[in-house]
Image (tube, coloured by chain):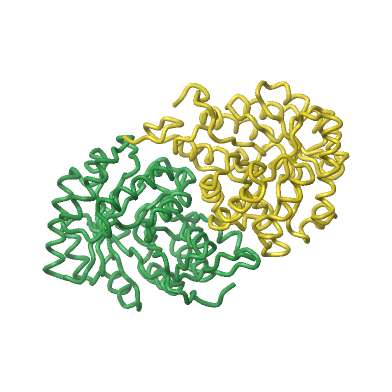
Chain colours: A green, B yellow
Amino acid sequence: MSSGPTHTAPAVLISEVGPRDGLQSVKSTMPTADKLRWIDALHAAGLREIEVASFVPARLLPQMADAADVVRHAVQLPGLAVMALVPNRKGAQAALEAGAHKLTMPVSASHAHSLANVRKTPTEMVEEVRAIAQLRTELAPGAGLEVGISTAFGCTLQGLVPEDDVIRLAVQCVEAGADDVGLSDTVGHANPAQVRRLFRRLRTEIGGHAGAAHMHNTRGLGIANCLAAWDEGVRTFDASLGGLGGCPYAPGASGNVVTEDLVFMFEAMGVATGIDIPRLVAARAPLMAGLPGEPVYGMTAEAGLPLGFVPGTSLQA
Amino acid sequence: MSSGPTHTAPAVLISEVGPRDGLQSVKSTMPTADKLRWIDALHAAGLREIEVASFVPARLLPQMADAADVVRHAVQLPGLAVMALVPNRKGAQAALEAGAHKLTMPVSASHAHSLANVRKTPTEMVEEVRAIAQLRTELAPGAGLEVGISTAFGCTLQGLVPEDDVIRLAVQCVEAGADDVGLSDTVGHANPAQVRRLFRRLRTEIGGHAGAAHMHNTRGLGIANCLAAWDEGVRTFDASLGGLGGCPYAPGASGNVVTEDLVFMFEAMGVATGIDIPRLVAARAPLMAGLPGEPVYGMTAEAGLPLGFVPGTSLQA
């Protein structure tokens, strides 16, 4: 419908996590050249923050063996904030040396999940945040440091996660040096009432340090939970092109919110994203070319834009 | 998780439209015996309003040739409000004679869609509402009469549908004798901002006559639009088990909100629906048995309930 990215200043930041979170969850490995084409296409669609890689040992995640190369390419794209996931100091150092603009660290609010995922307790992970914040100050004082509180809305191992634990951990991460702390529905347990409650408390406790909403669509509520977070003042949302992030039917950590549908919602509501939907849909081509046979999800890409749709305007005909 | 329908008085009414709206959109015809088993299973799960049939000429919709038989069965289920869609007086008479508790009439706000669908203008349909309201008073004064304003959020033929047209039509339908008037996103164009605006205006104009939200998931926003309507005070929601209602990818009138996911959202938020989710999921079996090969949708049924989930309580662990 439109011929290019919208010209209104974005009112919401869509942070694309497909090249990291999505690729990390699939079995096949996307060749580096395909990754770069895909990231270029995402950038061309107007995305201005992309989590491009994870700095973990290649023997654990062969999909991320080229993390430094991917970062070095992505930082050349104008206006793009290049994020990298780092689980520890070694990864943080490598990411900063490659030139990543922003580090993101997962810190789980569930003791059981934290041990299973990184073999550290939440408290030990706060100390890791502190160490990485110091490293960042030494190596790249301009770089950002974000923490995403995993299993903030529930855990497949522990079940309920006390909201007090989530908020206390967020406060500790800010005190340890994180610039902002977001909340992640890692396993798709969240509901809109809980999302509103937790983000309201988060904002009350850490103010402007309150970060992104990372929602999953495991039980079909991903977009509704984003709407609930938006209502509470959240202005950064993680999403994955084509919902990449493993089969959304798997009961585990899967089913990222589909970037195309989330962008459609905001643009239809009159909230400018800076993203051009036809170009965003076109960015599915390099993704699919790089991961032959891998299913992609999302409704807007299949249905197309409504007749009469004008992005960034909530039309009152 | 739970052993039966929740005991809290329902705070929201989920109106199941699968046996009418869903079946009408698929090519195959479900045998009557399967329909009855399916309706029984829906009732056993706790659903207390089901749109069971459409009273249209059998030559136009062979799927609905058994409408009277289905109604006569359904009215025997205790506590169930049995709804039937009627496009005209003849259908209304047949539905009331079969014992339907409530009639629902589609009245399109789009001139083009109204002509294409029923060969009448919206104004002519208001006169049909008036005639049916009179017939109802004569034949079955206790029966309800609901109007759903189709294409209230946009139209694949006309594009934008002026909000003033929608609201004026709703007012005219109430004046013509409808008990309540809901808004339908027939082709999946709606966004949450528009849903809030229109339902707010609807309530302002017709007060307690404001009826159900009938949302589609064509572009992935179905559940988010229901949340937006809930926020505006809507307390009746149409939904379809397994999202039955044609392939949700078709760009036309398709992609009903999935009952299972919608019920999960409300129960997780602490809003009692009166519906037992495991039994609701079990009601997919007779649906699938009666329509072999037809795809069913929905995430909650595949993912299962979260560990620690207690229906009807928004847990603050």
Specify whether B42 is left or right of B117.
left
The spot of residue A125 in percent (x, y) is: 18, 49
Which residue is rendered at x = 76% and y = 51% of the image? Answer: B172
The spot of residue A247 in percent (x, y) is: 45, 48
User: In the rendered image, which quarter contains the C terminus of chain B?
Assistant: top left
Which residue is rendered at x = 67% and y = 52% of the image? Answer: B186
Residue B152: name its quadrant.
bottom right
The spot of residue A216 in percent (x, y) is: 41, 49
Q: Nearer the viewer, residue B206 or B188?
A: B206
Kindly tell me whether residue B84 is visible in this rendering: no
Q: Nearer the viewer, residue B17 or A200?
A: A200
User: In the rendered image, which quarter contains the N terminus of chain B?
Assistant: top left
Specify whether B117 is left or right of A174.
right
The spot of residue B91 in percent (x, y) is: 84, 38
B63 w.r.t. B169: above or below: above
Kindly tell me whether residue B25 is visible in this rendering: yes
